[in-house]
Image (cartoon, rainbow, N blue to C red):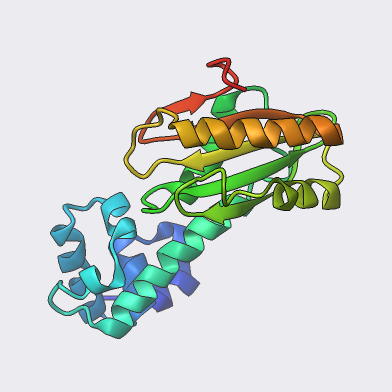
């Protein structure tokens, strides 16, 4: 690769560059930068998922990747995760739990904490907005329905869907998951904003509490 990666982005467009060239463009504009990221990719066996999940500290263990380069790469992957959350949000129509799983999986993949998301839907089950409402292990004593329904009312939601990840990869609901769900569902009944489902996302699997008849 004799051409500098940043120059090639302007000459042929980013879509024409290899993964190594794209990563190299983040940390420099030289063939030496390409060689450094090639070493980095070999360290992770070319697995971008593993690379994207690595901590900045872990990235610096590769020869040639310093703190500044590790921070740039980590920032790029985090930006990609956040960007992916916004792309389909205005046109996602929820027909099944699987739709929600496919929508949120990029946001929670590799995350080591539980994140509870609330999705606001209109009368046609189209997601009008969504947001993470809580980070940490779900517990009925700390999950406040008022925060969830404040968001719902602000977005004129006809209904809601809850979803959260299990970093262990096992989507089996815990007793607290069920308790939190029942508490929020009951509040929704009082406010006439139904909670349609609570979906737990694991590694390649998911659990719908609606399908399990646990709502």
Viewer-nearest residue: 212 or 87: 212
* Res. 3 visible in picture: yes
Quarter of the image with the C terminus in it? top right
* Res. 4 visible in picture: no
Residue 49, image x and y in percent?
Answer: 31, 50
Residue 209, image x and y in percent?
Answer: 55, 24
Above or below 157: residue 205: above
Q: Residue at x 27, y 83 (%)?
A: 67
Quarter of the image with the N terminus in it? bottom left
Is residue 152 found left or right of 41 in the rendered image? right
Q: Residue at x 34, y 32 (%)?
A: 170
Viewer-nearest residue: 210 or 142: 142
Residue 37, image x and y in percent?
Answer: 23, 69
Q: In which quarter of the image is residue 64?
A: bottom left
Is residue 50 found left or right of 201 in the rendered image? left
Q: Which residue is drawn at 82% across and 28% down?
A: 124
Residue 23, image x and y in percent?
Answer: 33, 68
Residue that sits furthest to the front in the current view:
141
Is residue 100 found left or right of 50 in the rendered image? right
Above or below 29: residue 98: above
Viewer-nearest residue: 81 or 110: 110
Q: Residue at x 43, y 32 (%)?
A: 174
Q: How many labels does the image show?
A: 0
Above or below 18: residue 210: above
């Amino acid at each position: 690769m004799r051409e500098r990666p940043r120059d090639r982005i302007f000459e042929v467009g980013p879509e024409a560059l290899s993964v190594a060239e794209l990563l190299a463009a983040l940390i420099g504009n030289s063939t030496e930068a390409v060689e450094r990221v090639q070493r980095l990719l070999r360290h992770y066996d070319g697995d971008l998922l593993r690379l994207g999940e690595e901590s900045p500290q872990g990235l610096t263990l590769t020869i040639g990747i310093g703190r500044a380069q590790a921070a740039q790469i980590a920032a790029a992957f985090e930006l990609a995760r956040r960007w992916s959350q916004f792309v389909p949000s205005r046109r996602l129509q929820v027909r099944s739990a699987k739709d929600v799983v496919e929508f949120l999986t990029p946001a929670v993949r590799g995350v080591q904490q539980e994140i509870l998301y609330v999705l606001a839907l209109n009368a046609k089950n189209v997601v009008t907005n969504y947001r993470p409402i809580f980070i940490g292990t779900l517990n009925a004593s700390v999950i406040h329905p008022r925060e969830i329904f404040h968001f719902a009312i602000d977005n004129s939601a006809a209904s809601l869907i809850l979803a959260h990840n299990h970093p262990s990869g096992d989507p089996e609901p815990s007793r607290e998951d069920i308790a939190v769900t029942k508490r929020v569902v009951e509040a929704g009944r009082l406010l006439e904003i139904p909670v349609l489902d609570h979906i737990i996302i694991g590694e390649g699997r998911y659990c719908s509490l609606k399908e399990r008849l646990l709502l």
